[in-house]
Amino acid sequence: MSDNHELLLQIKDLTIHYVTESGRVHAVEGLNLELARGETLGFVGETGAGKTTTALGIMRLLPMPPARIESGDIIFEGESLLTKSAAQMRAIRGGKIAMIFQDPMTSLDPVVPVLDQIAEMVELHHKGTKADARKRAGDMLELVGIPRERGSAYPHQFSGGMKQRVVIAIALACDPTLLIADEPTTALDVTIQAQVLELMHQLKEKFRTSMIMITHDLGIVAEMCDKVAIMYAGRVVEYGSTADIYETRLHPYTEGLFNSLPDLDSEQEELKVIHGLMPDPTNLPTGCCFHPRCPYAAEECSKVSPEMTEVSPGHFVACPVRTASFVKN
Amino acid sequence: MAEYTEQNEYRKQRGPFAEVMHRLSRSPLAMFGLAFIMLLVFCAVFANWLAPYPFAKQNLLHMFELPSSKYLLGTDEFGRDILSRLIYGARVSLQVGFIAVGISLVVGGLLGAFAGFYGGWLDNLIMRVMDVLLAVPQTLLAIAIAAALGPGLYNLMIAVGISAVPNYARIVRGSVLSIRGMEYVEAARAVGSSDLRIILRHIIPNSMAPIIVQSTLGVASAILNAAGLSFIGLGIQPPNPEWGAMLSGGRQYIRDFPHLTLYPGLAIMLTILALNFLGDGLRDALDPKLKR
């Protein structure tokens, strides 16, 4: 989609562990990602796959301790985020990288009028008077389809969809170059989901913002994203353009995810589900983490941790068994 | 129909203060409490004009007089007008009540907020010191501080204020702990707010409800504490009128002239009662679970 492949964000070999008394949680393990300007990356995986941990890691908002970045680097606009000082990070948060949280019901301060909450963001990152900030906040409200006059209302006087619009207005108020949306529609009902997604899509185009979209809804990914990364137990198992993944999904886990979507066209008695549960992140299986649940598992899968291989340009898979059979065909 | 919903929409747009006042006005007891406190504040402010006599004016020809049209509540052992002394006494009692609570609120509130927000060893250090202070009965602690500082109005406020610090620290810490984990605090971090800004703009306003209630009830106990200290001679010194000191002065004549102790006692009782009613009403008005 983006013609100039100017890299905005590059995550290299990122490993994040939570060190707790009951053991070491391998939340993110050797993660590599690249995101160009204007691109949208979908981050798909089950609860506990490490999606939110990665997002908070980029924002440097992980609670440390217990979280520890064991290795790797996060490079944003050519500079490492991990070596920034606290004050530099505060300028980046909100100003350059903004985040939309999962639940709009709880991510707005209940005792501050919504306009003031948007203005707070503007005040923090733009020089200018309070009046300027409030004017900009009012503009943002109108941009997300809420009349300016409603700005003096408190969050409890808004519906869920309107609150999420306010959250989006806050996130976009300072023209961030990267927007991280952590399951932005999970807490909303389906009709509102469609509206909010449409709004996000429009605004993203308008501001040419790059976006990381964390979700477990494959429909949203198909609609919004240019690239998809499928995560399982802290690792990216398949990574490629949305078209690649939807047409030639290779990793058995990706296949399992797609199979577990109900198909309206065919008569199916039962959903094909992936058997078993996510492994305990303090005690991951040896070799490929997915092998205990994998229908294609071979002997070697329990011994060797699979490397990412490029099966076609820009399409990476971490499964030697399926890659081999794909290459043969 | 459209007009109706629009009206409805705007009727609901009340600020938090107006909303709380609206809900408070539904409780008659709380309104009585509020009215009584307002009356007291009025008396305290305009004592110079309201009091029929100066508070220290002795009239030895009219000692121990029973209430009459000349002395509405009678006179004490030096022939001083009890009503005038009660009115001036309201000044002292309210000052002590509010300023002492102010001291404990600022000191305890900041200690609690830092302990709750940062946690870890700082939390442990502050709260263990508070636990030590809590282990000493509050009155005893106040007596010890007042005895160390010496008698006097300001020392009385400090003694009463400091002795209540642990209560406020605990309450503020508790509510900060519960708010610190809220998503909007994380969201505030995600827009680049500093710790201090988060504490001042998001955490303190959100933890106001329990603090306001505790303060209202705290004013009552501060007045009572101050009256107690004055009663045993560690507070306000004669001839300055203070309700506790008046009780103390009248206690040796209680068999023959009970009105010397009756009226100051009633004043203390009614004030505490009014503050407690107001505190209870505020607690209900500020409880979001009772929202209609």
Image (cartoon, grey):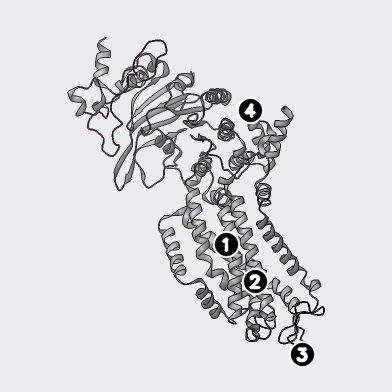
Name the residue: 38% across, 36% down: A73
Determine which residue is flagged by label 4.
A145
Decide which of tag 1 and tag 2 comes sooner along the chain.
Answer: 1
Are the numbered discs 2 and 3 placed on the same chain, yes or no?
Answer: yes
Q: Chain of mark 3?
A: B
**Which residue, as the protein is rendered here, is positioned at the far left?**
A299
Which residue type does callout 3 highlight? Leu
Magenta stretch, main secondary structure, is loop
Does the image show residue B164? yes
The residue singled out by tag 3 in the image is B60
Q: Which residues are magenta?
A: A265-289
Marks 4/1 in contact by CB < 8 Å: the verdict is: no
Location of mark 2 (residue): B268
Nearer to us in this view, A324 or A249: A249
Quote the CA–CA distance across marks 1 and 2.
Answer: 25 Å
> Dot 4 falls on which chain?
A
Picture quarter with the C terminus of chain A: top left
Q: Is residue A14 left or right of residue A119?
A: left
Going by the numbered disc 2, the residue's amino acid type is Ile
**Residue in the picture at 64% in, 32% down:** A141
Q: How many marks?
A: 4
Query: What is the C-alpha distance between the residues marked 2 and 3?
Result: 27 Å
From where the camera sits, is residue B242 visible?
Answer: no
Above or below, A91 against A140 in this view is: below
